[in-house]
Image (cartoon, helix red, strand yellow):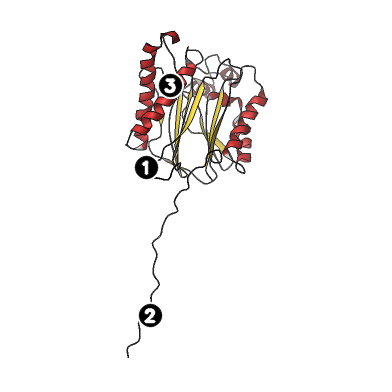
């Protein structure tokens, strides 16, 4: 009698772990502080950016506008721009980088249209705009203006988007020996913007066409420039604490530190946090 063939182990296909969805307040959260300004001219919103076939909140969109205080209607501009951006982003079915760009152009166009419908705001109203698209493993963004986007990784914080104020130009002059660090820090034009959403053609846009890979333990912080009250070292200390807590507690801690600094001319501050667990 022929012997039975021995059974062979079945090789199972290798499957990659499915990224988990974000949890509000635990993995993403935002907080605001009016500072010493009469009005809150920042506006932000989180939106679910997942496709219908994806797990809800496995892809989130943070959009933040810092209305220009020197222009009438800064708070209106940031509100309109953020709302228009999110609406247009959801209407598109193209690659994420192009969705971000089309949404940005739509937000800018919305301000141009509203200028003609709201004569009470004068000749201009404008805002910066920062849009961050995050998954548990990747990050993309588009930005205009000086609203910073920080990445905290392995104990170090780094600004990863461009600064469209005159600050980088002044810092370059410091490197060239044309200004001292103190002169650059207190220069009256330091916060003047080279680019912003004003309803006119955009002159400078910072965008990441290919996603940046995120790692477990990374913390992403998108903010208005009111966060610049804190130094990079102070942010690193706060975010080091944040590794052991939730996104809402991180945002609370950053706002508390800004309030505690108690600057005489503290600007509006908005802080949006995305934590990669």
Seen in the picture, residue 28 relative to 127 is either above or below; the reply is below
Q: Secondary structure at mark 2?
A: loop
Task: Name the residue at 35% across, 87% down.
Answer: 3
Q: Secondary structure at mark 1?
A: loop
Question: Which corner quadrant of the image does residue 107 belong to?
Answer: top left
Q: Is residue 202 at all visible to an observer of this figure?
A: no
Q: Which residue is mark 1?
A: 52
Q: Nearer the viewer, residue 143 or 32?
A: 32
In the picture provided, is 91 more to the left or to the right than 81? left
Q: CA distance from mark 3 to mark 1?
A: 26 Å
| x then y, percent, for residue 151 | 52, 37
Q: Given this view, does label 1 or label 2 mark the residue nearer the observer? A: 1
Q: Split into 4 quadrants, where in the image is the N terminus?
A: bottom left
Q: Given this view, does label 3 or label 1 mark the residue nearer the observer? A: 1
Tag on residue 80? 3
Q: CA distance from mark 2 to mark 3?
A: 70 Å
Question: Which corner quadrant of the image does residue 125 belong to?
Answer: top left
In the picture provided, is 254 more to the left or to the right than 19? right
| x then y, percent, for residue 178 | 53, 18
Task: Name the residue at 40% across, 27% down.
Answer: 85
Counting residues from the start of the chain, the first of labels 2 and 3 encountered is 2
Counting residues from the start of the chain, the first of labels 3 and 1 encountered is 1
Q: Nearer the viewer, residue 266 or 233?
A: 266
Q: Which residue is mark 2?
A: 6
Q: Given this view, does label 2 or label 3 mark the residue nearer the observer? A: 3
């Amino acid at each position: 009698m022929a012997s039975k063939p021995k059974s062979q182990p079945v090789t199972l296909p290798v499957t990659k772990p499915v990224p988990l969805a974000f949890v509000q307040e635990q993995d993403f959260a935002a907080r605001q502080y009016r500072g010493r300004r009469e009005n809150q001219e920042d506006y932000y919103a989180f939106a679910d950016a997942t496709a219908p076939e994806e797990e809800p909140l496995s892809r989130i969109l943070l959009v933040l506008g810092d209305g220009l205080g020197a222009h009438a209607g800064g708070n209106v501009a940031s509100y309109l721009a953020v709302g228009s951006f999110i609406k247009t982003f959801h209407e598109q079915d193209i690659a994420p980088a192009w969705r971000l760009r089309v949404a940005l152009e739509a937000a800018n166009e919305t301000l141009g249209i509203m200028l003609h419908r709201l004569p009470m705001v004068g000749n201009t109203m404008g805002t910066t705009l920062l849009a961050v698209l995050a998954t548990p493993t990747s990050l993309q963004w588009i930005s205009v203006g000086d609203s910073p986007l920080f990445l905290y990784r392995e104990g170090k914080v780094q600004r990863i988007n461009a600064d469209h104020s005159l600050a980088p130009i002044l810092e370059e002059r410091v490197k060239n020996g044309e200004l001292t660090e103190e002169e650059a820090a207190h220069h009256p034009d330091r916060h003047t913007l080279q680019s912003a959403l004003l309803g006119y053609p955009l002159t400078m846009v910072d965008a990441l066409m290919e996603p940046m890979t995120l790692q477990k333990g990374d913390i992403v912080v998108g903010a208005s420039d009111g966060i610049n009250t804190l130094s990079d070292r102070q942010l690193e200390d706060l975010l080091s604490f944040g590794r052991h807590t939730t996104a809402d507690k991180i945002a609370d801690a950053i706002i508390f530190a800004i309030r505690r600094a108690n600057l005489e001319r503290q600007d509006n501050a908005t802080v949006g946090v995305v934590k990669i667990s």
